[in-house]
Structures are given as structure tokens and as C-alpha cells.
Image (spheres, grey):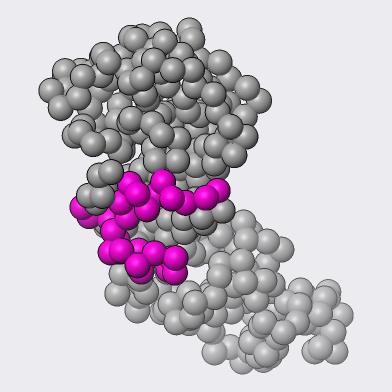
């Protein structure tokens, strides 16, 4: 049995927190020896810690290697569908070398694959597979069978998790293997969506920097400085500051604490040329910047602390104040610092 490492750049097993393994890298033998519980545990650990891998494809290689060993397949591939018959390799696991971005043509997959309610498919007598350009490392025309699952992705993108075999044998999938296959497909789809979301956020961040509309943190702090108003406006600010994170910031509650009616409070603020909503926004903005930059508090928790009805309301308000979402502001001024 070939005990050589499957992936040269994958993290050590110890780094993934897998106590059942002592080898620095997992071999075919290690993977084949796993029972269903061990396979699911390994799958979970890899998916949950995929950000610790050097790249998306490195994490995928470990998942594909696990499936290839457990399903006794010759080749495992994660494919992105480009057209009805053309697929692009995003990750692979096999004894021979392919490359990411390589195109393969699978001319009879569309007509032969049979989906069930979980979108698992099998294709027997699978002879119409060619590479573009032709792979000298592996004769893809020798492939005789395939099984796998479609990835449930957002938008128009379509993906396939495929396990190929060169032996002319029926591909019966056991109930245990079916469960593992479904979990792999769901996990990979989730990782793919997370990777797309990160790429989109990075693009948005670069656009913000390129536009020149980004201010310095000091400029944002100046915008969020609390007004040092005298009279009723100063009293409202003091009460709002005291209640932040502890009580409602509604005008009714603030008026009650000041022993005023709502209408009287609004009228007296209007006489000073300011509204209650403006004062409350100033206080919320001031505390939002401080929390986002200095604390690890979640956006949902910050929304609640500032007495917004939900995260969306807080995000919309913060974009109105700064032009940035709270998460982007935090990334720029804390995570990028």
C-alpha cells in the first residue's frame, strides 16, 4: 500500500486538533482505516478549520483524499461547470497530477447522471471523458464509472463533487457512503460560498480605497464627537449616554426621565435648532465607532447595545454616517491596522 503523503502543503494533523492521529501528514492507509465516525469527524475538522490551510484548494485536497480513500475511487475532483459538457478543475486528488483550472469535457454526464432527492448521482459505463488539453499524466479516457453529488450554490454557478473509477464495475453506494458524500457536498458548497463572499468583500474594500472616499479614523471620530450643548440638548445627550447598552433610547423614555412630555421635549429641542433623532444619531455614532475599533463585540450585539431594532437598521444607519458598513469599518480601522 502506498503510504506517501497525499498533499505536500496541507497542515499537520496536530494543527487540526485531531487526537487520533500522530503522523505529521495523512496517508492513504490512515484515511482508509477510518470508520464512518472518524471520517465525519475529520471532515468536520477540516471544514471548520479551512481558513488555517494555505489555500482553498489545499483544504479541498484533504476532503477529496478522504472521499477517494473511503469510496475506493481512482480520482476525486471538485469541478465547476462552464457549459453543458465542459468542467473546470478546482481541486483534485489522485496519484497522478492534474492542475487547477484544467478543463475536462464530460460529454455524456448530462444525459446519464441520475439524481435522487439529495442530488447524488451515479454513472456506469462512463467512457466519454477527455481532457482539454490532453493530460499526459493520466489517461482520462480509461475512466469507466463515476458517482458524486451536485453542489448547492447561489446564483448561476454550478459545481460537482465527482469520484471517478477506471474499473468497469457497478457503482453501488452504501447508505453510510451516501451520508458521507452528502456531508462532503454540503460542506464544500458552504466553503465555496464563504470563499466567494470573502472575495467580494475584498473587491468592495479595494474599490473604497481606490475611490479616495475613505477618511482617516481621526476624521470619523471628529464627525462622531458628541455636541457640548447647553440646556435641553446637553441634558438629552447626558441621558442617552447613561442609557446606552442598558435601557431604551426612545424619545418617550428620554422625555419621561427628564420629567417632560414628548411634545415639550421636541419643541424645546426645535428652539435650539436640533431634533431628538439627530442627537440620538450622534450618540449612537460616537459609541459605535469606539466599540467597532476597540472591542470584539459582534455586529448583532452592537445593534442591540445601540437600541436598533435589528442589525439591518444599524447597518443602514452606519452607512449613512460613514459610507461604510460596520463590518468594513471594523476591518479597515482595526483588522488592517
Q: Position of residue 3 (x, y in %)?
A: 26, 49
**Left or right side of 234 for 198:** left
Asked which quadrant contains residue 135, the reply is: top left
Closer to the camera in the image, 259 or 244: 244
As drawn, the residue found furthest toward the left would be 136
**Left or right side of 252 for 221:** left
| Identity of the residue drawn at 32% across and 18% down | 143
* Magenta stretch in the rendered image: 8-36
Count of all numbered marks drawn on residues in the image? 0
Image quadrant holding the N terminus, namely top left
**Left or right side of 143 for 37:** right
**Left or right side of 81 for 290:** right
| Identity of the residue drawn at 55% across and 37% down | 177
| Identity of the residue drawn at 45% across and 41% down | 70
Q: Position of residue 250 (x, y in %)?
A: 76, 74
Image quadrant holding the C terminus, namely bottom left
Asked which quadrant contains residue 248, the reply is: bottom right
Residue 8 visible to the viewer: yes
Q: Position of residue 41 (x, y in %)?
A: 52, 56
Up the image or down, 242 lies above or below 300; here it is: below
Closer to the camera in the image, 254 or 18: 18
As drawn, the residue found furthest toward the front would be 1
10 in the magenta segment: yes
Up the image or down, 143 lies above or below 24; here it is: above
Q: Position of residue 84 (x, y in %)?
A: 40, 13
| Identity of the residue drawn at 54% across and 24% down | 172
Closer to the camera in the image, 189 or 273: 189
Asked which quadrant contains residue 83, the reply is: top left
150 in the magenta segment: no
Residue 83 visible to the viewer: no
Magenta stretch, main secondary structure class:
loop
Amino acid at each position: 500500500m502506498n503510504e506517501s503523503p497525499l498533499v505536500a502543503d496541507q497542515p499537520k494533523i496536530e494543527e487540526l486538533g485531531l487526537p487520533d492521529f500522530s503522523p505529521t501528514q495523512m496517508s492513504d492507509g490512515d484515511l482508509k482505516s477510518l470508520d464512518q465516525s472518524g471520517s465525519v469527524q475529520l471532515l468536520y475538522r477540516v471544514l471548520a478549520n479551512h481558513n488555517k490551510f494555505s489555500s482553498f484548494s489545499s483544504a479541498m485536497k484533504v476532503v477529496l483524499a478522504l472521499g477517494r480513500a473511503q469510496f475506493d475511487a481512482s480520482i476525486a475532483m471538485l469541478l465547476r461547470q462552464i457549459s453543458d459538457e465542459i468542467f473546470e478543475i478546482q481541486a483534485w486528488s489522485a496519484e497522478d497530477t492534474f492542475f487547477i483550472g484544467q478543463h475536462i469535457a464530460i460529454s455524456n454526464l448530462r444525459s446519464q447522471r441520475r439524481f435522487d432527492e439529495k442530488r447524488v448521482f451515479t454513472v456506469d459505463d462512463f467512457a466519454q471523458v477527455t481532457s482539454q488539453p490532453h493530460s499526459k499524466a493520466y489517461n482520462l479516457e480509461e475512466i469507466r464509472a463515476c458517482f458524486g453529488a451536485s453542489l448547492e450554490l447561489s446564483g448561476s454557478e454550478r459545481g460537482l463533487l465527482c469520484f471517478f473509477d477506471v474499473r468497469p464495475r457497478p457503482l453501488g453506494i452504501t447508505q453510510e457512503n451516501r451520508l458521507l458524500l452528502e456531508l462532503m457536498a454540503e460542506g464544500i458548497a458552504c466553503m465555496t460560498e464563504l470563499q466567494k463572499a470573502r472575495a467580494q468583500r475584498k473587491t468592495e474594500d479595494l474599490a473604497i480605497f481606490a475611490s479616495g472616499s475613505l477618511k482617516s479614523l481621526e476624521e470619523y471620530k471628529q464627525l462622531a464627537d458628541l455636541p457640548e450643548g447647553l440646556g435641553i440638548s446637553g441634558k438629552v445627550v447626558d441621558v442617552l449616554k447613561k442609557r446606552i447598552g442598558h435601557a431604551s433610547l426612545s424619545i418617550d423614555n428620554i422625555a419621561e426621565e427628564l420629567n417632560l412630555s414628548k411634545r415639550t421635549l421636541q419643541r424645546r429641542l426645535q428652539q435650539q435648532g436640533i431634533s431628538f433623532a439627530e442627537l440620538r444619531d450622534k450618540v449612537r455614532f460616537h459609541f459605535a465607532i469606539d466599540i467597532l475599533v476597540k472591542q470584539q463585540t459582534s455586529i448583532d450585539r452592537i445593534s442591540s447595545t445601540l437600541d436598533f431594532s435589528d442589525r439591518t437598521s444599524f447597518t443602514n444607519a452606519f452607512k449613512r454616517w460613514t459610507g461604510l458598513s460596520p463590518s468594513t469599518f471594523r476591518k479597515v480601522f482595526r483588522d488592517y491596522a
